[in-house]
Amino acid sequence: MERKVRVRFAPSPTGPLHIGGVRTALYNYIFARANGGDMILRIEDTDSHRFVPGAEEYINEALAWLGIGIDEGVREGGAYGPYKQSERRDIYREHVKQLLDNGKAYIAFDTPEELEAARKETPNFQYDASTRGGMSNSLTLGEEETRRRIEAGDQYVVRFLIEPGREVKVNDRIRGEVIINSSILDDKVLYKSADDLPTYHLANIVDDHLMEVSHVIRGEEWLPSAPLHVLLYEAFGWADTMPEFVHLPLLLKPVGNGKLSKRDGDKLGFPVFPLEWHDPKNGETSSGYREQGYLPEAVVNFLALLGWNPGDDSELMTMQQLIDKFSFEHCSKSGAKFDYKKGLWFNHEYLAQKSDEDLAALFMPILEAKGISGFTPEYVAKAVGMVKGRANLVGDLWEQGDFFFKAPETYAEKDVRKRWSEDTPRIMEELIGVLESIDDMTSANAEKIVLDWIASKGYHLGNVMNAFRLAVVGACRGPHMFDITELMPKEEVTARIRKAIATINA
Ligand code: GLU
């Protein structure tokens, strides 16, 4: 019988979710939806030293912003909870005991100093079959002494007993069969008595099993852990229900070699986090896609194509289209260069597709932050509608359309030199009179009247129109001039021309 698809995104709340983690969450979600499966969000917080307050809330908020829905999780609940590992201590304790009872794991008392000494003595020391016989553990001390030391309150760890010389096979959906020899693995720590918590490996396997996870979809950086995970499944007797592994290609630097890092983003000016993050430890702020003016649907589309292709040349795809087209067969083995410029392009496309009203709603907070008020939503919608084709980010709407909301304070020098001559003030005075005489300021009508006037006077069309634009916009840029003056109150237009006459000549 086909197994029900159940996937999990399992972040550790050690800081803001990195954009690579977001891509992992996205692929899990898309795969779940494509297969009528369940998407689990599990919080892997067993490393108490690395816990960062606010990180879990950040993860929830980021996934919600991007439309990555969760079926089971800390907030959603579900039949397999709790979904936070720090609330599952009893479960892990039981499973550690099971491994100890079956001789698949053992107790080790070695202090940090003893381990350090062993490392000094033996080059490339690894705690394994070749060295464990010389260390302080239940295998060398015997049952009674081990019990005595535990009762005396000595701290210990539980280590996985790895048999050397075995071939370990990891079946990866993207990479195929990966085989390693168990001799290269060390006896990983599975549990620490000091904080009564399991390590990542144990908790991860136990939970994947108990939560009936069918596919483990995660970043390539976890591939080296996979052989150990396979052995753990076997040690528990769960080999039959081992999930399928899917290790996603790394996200690489936009330029040069290596893994994408926060430094690349800082250097080239793009965020590596979905949302802005305020580090509670040092007060530093890291920029986020949301705050930089990206649309969630653009970020989703961009990320989906980092390591996967639809098999045809479609680029713009909604979440539903991604779900319809997704398959692991089109995931690549090699890393995906983080082409942030492509991300901007996606955002540009999605901005242009948005309705003027929706875009205005996104732009309003930017106006408010600039202390600009008093414009109706209809006015803002029309204004952003005229410039949205020139914007990559929501914030670009301000650079492109600021003049709709405030008169120019300065005039672009180069344009003044080229377009504002001695008789311009006189012609502009005349233009004010022409504009005042127009009752119907709709674009085509005003254009006809003004152009007729220019022709009848024999003025230079380009010079007059550019001076007009300079006075209203502050530079020779922006949408069609008569579309601007259709939207703006006529008194505002004429006041700006008067101001330009007074200012530019002085
Ligand atoms: N807690 C691990 C992380 O932070 C989970 C890795 C996995 O998916 O197995 O990514």
Image (cartoon, grey):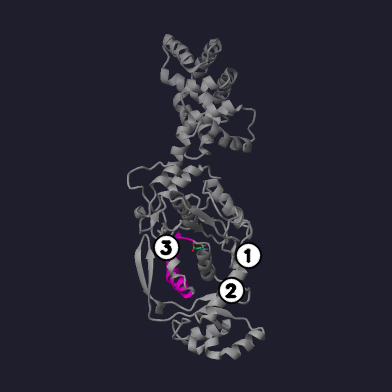
Q: Which residues are magenta?
A: 213-235
Which image quarter is the C terminus in? Answer: top right
Question: SS class of the residue under badge 2?
Answer: helix
Q: Is residue 80 visible?
A: yes
Query: For this view, does 42 lie left or right of residue 214?
Result: right
The residue shown at (57%, 60%) is 80
User: Magenta stretch mostly in which secondary structure?
Assistant: helix
* Disc 1: which residue: 87
Q: Nearer the viewer, residue 67 or 359?
A: 67
Pinpoint residue 244: horizontal percent, then vertical percent: 42, 62
Mark 1 or 2, closer to the camera: 2
Residue 245's label in the rendered image is 3
Ranked by sequence position, the earlier of labels 1 and 2 is: 1
- Residue 462: image quadrant is top left
Q: Is residue 220 above or below residue 25?
A: below
Ranked by sequence position, the earlier of labels 3 and 1 is: 1
Mark 2 or 3, closer to the camera: 2
Amino acid type of the residue tagged 3 in the rendering: Phe
The residue shown at (48%, 31%) is 387
220 in the magenta segment: yes
Residue 94's label in the rendered image is 2
The residue shown at (66%, 85%) is 151
User: Among all residues in the image, which is located at the extreme front?
Assistant: 1
Amino acid type of the residue tagged 1 in the rendering: Glu
